[in-house]
């Protein structure tokens, strides 16, 4: 059906926007106003679990959370615990090259995809590769489609790698001083500790989500930031070593969780921060990433820029990857729209200065394409446009995204 729709649109030069689950934080699922919207919600079949190859084959409209659940039935795990998994479709996750807290250990979603079935703008259907872990046969079309935001073709099926479960413990670590928190993160990796995930929330974010959950902020004004570390057991350093190491950077109580019920409770403030932000006000969600060693530098830049505009904002994210989400909230007392462009420009210029880029996992979409030139030279953008033209010479598919 998708092939027939695309053939018709191609022959008649009808623009088309592809829509998955619609979490849509970069404006990727929004119509440009002169196109049709193709929903993938009926492509919702889990095709196969292969325990020998440890793969799962799914259609692109499968809700990501369903993949976790299916893998667990076979004593395997899908390693990407994407925050929007109860809503987002796996096809959208792949099209955006999404990440997750577990990307620290397993890499982002591009590390879990072996093969894709796609429908090209002219209606032709193809597999991008083979469902094997090694493939040195020409250009890697699979990786080209991951992160392409639906501009090169429509993902209809995916073959994903599964992993065996591992034993972990979850730690929640409050820090009284933000510089000590970032010092600890650097020292954690310098001293050869490893984690499945390492997540961060600042003081404002923790206060916001505590109010949303109607729970007392148990740390009050005593903390400036919090880390969650999901720590893999049976590694070089045992949990006692880690506890002693952490204690040299914070005098706050460290909380532990070993079973799944306790982990769920300990994760709650981090997992619900998105809901809390949406409930609070309209906000701009910035998704920046820098090399981990420059995390404190960009954190200070973000604070300086946002404070200079008197914005109310929170900083959360995947600190283990140098990937931060900045939620800047709309306030009627200030000229939010007018100042936002200047604020974003300052932040993105700083990101580029520190060797990073303007999206770690949300994509460029239609909201951030004006800023692509701040982190990418013109010749590189033109090469991308040439790739787009090769696949879609009539520019009918998601034509308003990225560029």
Image (spheres, rainbow, N blue to C red):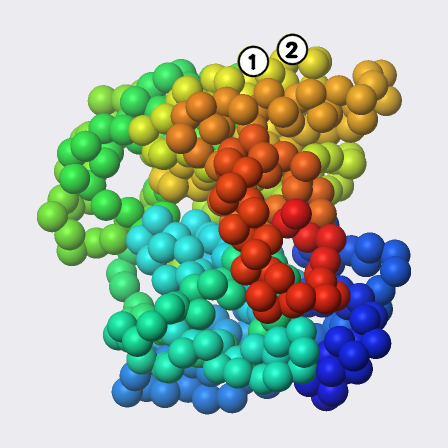
Quadrant in which residue 193 is drawn? top left
Q: On the image, numbered disc 2 is attached to which residue?
A: 308
Tell me the crowding category of disc 2: few under 14, some 14 to 19, or many 20 or more residues within 10 angstroms, Cα based: few
Front one among 363 and 400: 400
Residue 230 in the image, given as x and y percentages of width and height: 34, 48
Q: Is residue 113 left or right of residue 132?
A: right
Q: Is residue 19 visible?
A: no
Mark 2 and mark 1 residues within 8 Å of each other at the beta carbon? yes
Check residue 234 in the rendering and tell me which mark sits there, or answer none: none
Q: CA distance from mark 2 to mark 1?
A: 6 Å
Q: Quadrant of residue 359?
A: top right
x, y (%) of residue 306? 63, 18
Residue 368, image quadrant: top right
Taking the view exactly as shown, the residue that stands out farthest to the left is: 236
- Tell me, yes or no, if residue 159 can be seen here: yes
Which residue in the structure is indicated by mark 1? 304
Horizontal arrangement in the rendering, residue 79 relative to residue 25 (left or right): left
Pick the front one: 251 or 336: 336
Height in image: 233 above or below 164?
A: above
Residue 23: % across, % down: 68, 56
Where disc 2 sits, the SS reads: helix
- Count how many numbered circles sit on residues in the image: 2
Task: Label 1: state its secondary structure.
Answer: helix
Mark 1: few, some, or many residues within 10 Å (few <14, many ≥20)? few
When the figure is inspected, residue 402 is found, relative to residue 186, above or below; the finding is: below
Residue ID at (56%, 47%): 382
Q: On screen, 292 above or below 42? A: above
Residue 253 placement (x, y as % from top left)? 35, 29
At horizontal 15% and vertical 52% (from top left) the residue drawn is: 235
């Amino acid at each position: 059906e998708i092939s027939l729709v695309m053939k018709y649109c191609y022959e008649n030069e009808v623009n088309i926007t592809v829509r998955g689950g619609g979490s849509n934080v970069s404006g990727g699922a929004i119509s440009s106003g002169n196109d049709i919207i193709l929903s993938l919600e009926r492509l919702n079949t889990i095709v196969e679990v292969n325990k020998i190859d440890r793969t799962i084959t799914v259609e692109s409209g499968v809700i990501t959370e369903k993949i976790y659940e299916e893998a667990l039935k076979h004593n395997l795990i899908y390693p990407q615990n994407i925050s929007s998994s109860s809503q987002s479709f796996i096809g959208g996750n792949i099209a955006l090259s999404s990440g997750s807290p577990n990307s620290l250990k397993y890499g982002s979603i591009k590390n879990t995809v072996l093969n894709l079935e796609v429908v090209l703008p002219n209606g032709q259907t193809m597999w991008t590769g083979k469902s094997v872990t090694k493939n040195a046969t020409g250009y890697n079309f699979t990786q080209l489609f991951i992160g392409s935001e639906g501009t090169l073709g429509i993902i209809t099926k995916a073959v994903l790698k599964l992993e065996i479960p591992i034993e972990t413990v979850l730690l929640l670590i409050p820090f009284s001083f933000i510089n000590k928190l970032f010092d600890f993160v650097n020292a954690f990796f310098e001293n050869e500790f490893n984690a499945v995930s390492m997540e961060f929330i600042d003081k404002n974010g923790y206060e916001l989500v505590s109010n949303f959950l109607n729970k007392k902020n148990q740390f009050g004004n005593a903390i400036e930031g919090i880390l969650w570390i999901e720590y893999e057991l049976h590694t070089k350093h045992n949990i006692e070593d880690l506890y002693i190491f952490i204690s040299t950077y914070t005098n706050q109580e460290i909380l532990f969780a070993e079973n799944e019920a306790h982990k769920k409770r300990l994760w709650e403030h981090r997992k619900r921060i998105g809901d809390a932000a949406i409930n609070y006000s309209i906000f701009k969600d910035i998704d920046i990433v820098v090399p981990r060693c420059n995390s404190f530098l960009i954190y200070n830049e973000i604070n300086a820029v946002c404070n200079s505009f008197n914005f109310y904002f929170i900083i959360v994210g995947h600190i283990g990857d140098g990937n931060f989400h900045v939620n800047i909230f709309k306030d009627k007392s200030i000229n939010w729209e007018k100042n936002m462009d200047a604020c974003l420009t300052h932040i993105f210029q700083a990101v580029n200065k520190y060797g990073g880029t303007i999206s770690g996992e949300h994509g460029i979409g239609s909201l951030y394409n004006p800023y692509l030139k701040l982190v990418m030279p013109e010749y590189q953008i033109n090469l991308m446009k040439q790739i787009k033209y090769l696949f879609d010479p009539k520019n009918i598919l998601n034509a308003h995204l990225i560029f």
